Amino acid sequence: MILTQESIQEIKEKTAKYPRKKSGILPALTVAYRQLGYVDDEIYHEISKVIKVPYVEIAEAATFYTMFPKKSRGKYLIQVCHNISCALLGADSLISYLEDKLGIKKGETTADNLFTLISVECLGSCSTAPMMQINHDFHENLTREKVDGILETLRSEA
Ligand code: FES
């Protein structure tokens, strides 16, 4: 087992609150992600055994959401919105700019394990497009200069 006894216990406690076992899938994935920083096939199987829900249902839920990656991510997860408002205001060029600045492609993590770059669907901040979320913080009305400043600040804080 890769999940610790503490995680397994927490998963059991959380899922016991729900009348349907399936309702415990997301809480279980959240516990596993918090422990490991990723959730892959092996973990789907472990969760399946713990909460007694078929593996395929765990995998379906985990791969539907962007918050349960199969590989661990950098300290800062940069999620750039590529949906319509942001796309109209330059999201693609912003993503290319970030790829160049960080020396990685979308979906990759920098060699120093500091930044992971992904693009995502609408984050609900369309009126301040283009925008991105880094960990829990929104950065809005982005320009290349703003992006430079944000990356510089994060690097200095790391
Ligand atoms: S389209 Fe980008 S936040 Fe909604």
Image: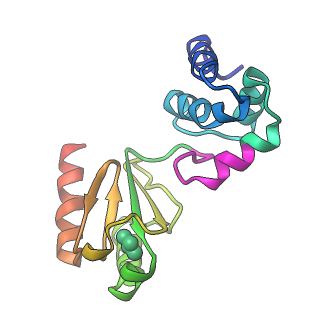
In the rendered image, residue 113, in percent from the top left (x then y), is placed at: 42, 47
Queried whether the magenta region covers residue 60, the answer comes back as: yes
Q: Please, is residue 69 above or below residue 107 in the view?
A: above
* Location of residue 28 (image quadrant): top right
Residue drawn 49% across the image and 31% down it: 34
Image quadrant, ligand 1? bottom left
* Location of residue 91 (image quadrant): bottom left
Give left or right: position of 93 versus 53.
left
Residue drawn 25% across the image and 73% down it: 128
Residue drawn 73% across the image and 24% down it: 51
Region rendered in magenta: 59-71
Residue drawn 32% across the image and 48% down it: 136
Give left or right: position of 119 versus 17.
left
* Location of residue 36 (image quadrant): top right
In the rendered image, residue 126, in percent from the top left (x then y), is placed at: 33, 74
In the rendered image, residue 8, in percent from the top left (x then y), is placed at: 63, 17
